[in-house]
Structures are given as structure tokens and as C-alpha cells.
Amino acid sequence: MEINRDMLIDLTEARGIAGNEGAVRDVFRKWADPYAEEFVQDGLGGIFAKATGDASGPRILMAAHLDEVGFMVSQITEKGFLKFVPIGGWWSQVVLAQQVEITTREGKVYHGVTGSKPPHVLTQAARKKPIDMKDVFIDIGASSAEEVEAMGIRPGDMITPYIETRRMNDTKFLLGKAWDNRIGLAVAIEVLKHAHEVGHSSVLYAGANAQEEVGLRGAKTATHMLKPDIALALDTGTAGDTPGMTKQEADSELGKGPQVIVYDASMIAHRGLRQFVTDIAEDLDIPFQYTFIPGGGTDAGSMHQTLDGIPSLAITVPVRYLHTHTSVIHEDDFKNTVRLVNAILERLDRDALVKIQANV
């Protein structure tokens, strides 16, 4: 499998926080259109491409999420600085001195940088404390509130991290601002392509939910609308292979394969589906990593509680530096995630569904 560099750049550099995912939807439509029977969209903005192999087969939902972590303009100061609220989970220390982009309702994009007091004016005690997010601001080179307002910037406008997507020094490590979760969306596009080329025994809906980063919200509406028999969240998970990380915090490594999440704060993976997936991986020698994330969750946490209860599982690409401007993935993990998800689609027929549902 060759990496589609242009697709990955389009996806990760698109701007889209929760509640403002339109640009990401457009990119998904662009790349999924050749393989889609039709597109369906829920009321919160989640979008899915339908691909029917066997109309009498199981209904399968494979869902990434559209949104990335970012910010929203909350106030324009008298001197033309922007105050903001975080959209998604941020640690204040990684927000300082970073480049950002502000997108107005008309779609115009302005460049800015996060700022705070310099260390020269801080007491020794203040230097040792994490900065409070309310003390961080954004400088866009304006001198007054009137100047900012003349640009069309208003409270509620989207702010996203700014970084150029790139391969790191001719290695298999890939740097980008929003692998969480545009790499999951890339997996969804690849499985649609595979379904189109190879065929399958199900009714597939592959795409992405809205508003995952603010409480797994779009997964509720999308799953209710699509009524799948099986649901897979295609997301990202924490890598633990950097200095200072312990195996108790995260034990996955980049390059060792996708993560199959057994337990996280949002759900316990369905036993029958988990065993079905891991049996496939072992049978085909696809590397994978069992993962426990007690401090986080994926859209599978909402999927499995919808309707009468849906067998659900999260398959995730390990990522270094999640919820920062600069996240890193490994090319082989993406490729092996695609291999695994494609194999699941090939083997998930009506008989397999019955066995999965019985193994609770």
C-alpha cells in the first residue's frame, strides 16, 4: 500500500474544531466520492459514505471523527488581543508561544500567535506553576478592538493550530497538527476504496462523527440515524514510547501496529467483536497492540450505548504528543490499521455477526 500524501495533507491541514467541521467534511467528500454510493449526514454534521455489498448483510458503521482540538474566540480586548476558550482537552503548558489560525464566519483566515507574560516579570514561585489558560491570549498584530472587528473576527470564531504536515527527516514518522483524528478519516476513505475494488457482504457506512472532542456527541446522533449492527471507532490513541512515559501511563509504541482498545473510560469493548478482530489480526499476521486507556475515551463509548446496545470497538493509530500542535504517527501503523479494517470488512458477513452477538 502506498501512502496517499496529498490526501493526508488535505485532511490534516483542514481546519475544523467541534461545531465547525464543514471544511473537513468537504475534504472527506472529495476523496471518498469515487467510492460512495451516496452520502448521508446527521443533524450535527457527521458525514458517511454508503457502500452496499450485500443489502441483506450486516450494517457496519466505521466512524472516525471530523473535529480536532482547538479554540474559540471569546473576547476581543481594547488593545486588539484575542481571548479564547479551549475546545477539547488541552494542557496549558503546550499552548504557549504557538502559531494559530483564526477563521471568520466568511471563511477568511488570519494568522496569530499565543502569548503570555515573559519570564522576566514573573516571580520565582510563578515560574514553577503551570500557566492558567485564562491568562493566555492571541496576538494577531492588531492595535485595537476596532481593527480586529474590521477584519471580521467575532466571538465564536474558530481558532486552530498552525503547522505544516511533513515526513520527518526521510523516516517513517509523520508530523501533523491534527492526526487526531484525520488519520482515522484516512482509514475510513481507504476502506471505502477497498470495498469498491474488492466487494463485501455487508452494508457499509464509513465516514466521521462530529463533536467527538467535546464529549462524544456526534456519535450518538450518527449511530441513532444509521442503526448499525456493528460499530467501529477509527481513532487515535496514546503512545508511550517517549522519555518520561511509563508503561502504566501508556504502553503502546509507534511502529508496532494499531491499538485494539480493551478498556477505556467510556466503555468496555464488546468481547465477541474484540475476539473477532484480534483473531483476524493474528490469522493474517497483522501486528497490533492491546491497549487500556482509563483516562480517555472514543466515539465507541457513545456508539455502544445507542438504541438497544451495539457491539462496538475502537481501533486506533498510536500517536505521540496528542492534543498539541505537533503530533507524530508512524507510517506502518496507518498501513496496518488499513489492512486490519479491510480484513474485518471482508470477513464480517451475516454468519459472523450472529457469532459476535452471541459472545457477550
Image (cartoon, rainbow, N blue to C red):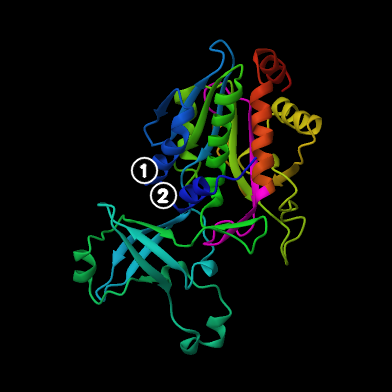
Front-most of residues 197 and 154 = 197
Q: Identity of the amino acid at label 1?
A: Gly
Residue 312 part of the magenta-drawn span:
yes
Q: Are marks 2 and 1 in contact (CB under 8 Å)?
A: yes
Of residue 300 and residue 62, the one placed in the foreground of this image is 62
Rendered location of residue 329, percent (x, y): 63, 53
User: Which region is colored magenta?
Assistant: 304-331
Q: In the rendered view, tell whether residue 199 sits above or below residue 140.
A: above
Q: 288 or 220: which is nearer to us?
A: 288
| Residue at the extreme top of the image, as rendered | 56
- Mark 2 is on which residue type? Gly
**Looking at the image, which residue is at 23% across and 74% down?**
144
Q: CA distance from mark 2 to mark 1?
A: 7 Å
Q: Which residue is drawn at the image coordinates 50% and 73% (left, top)?
A: 131
Q: Which residue carries the number 2 mark?
A: 16
Quarter of the rendering containing residue 357: top right
Q: Pointer 1: what residue?
A: 22
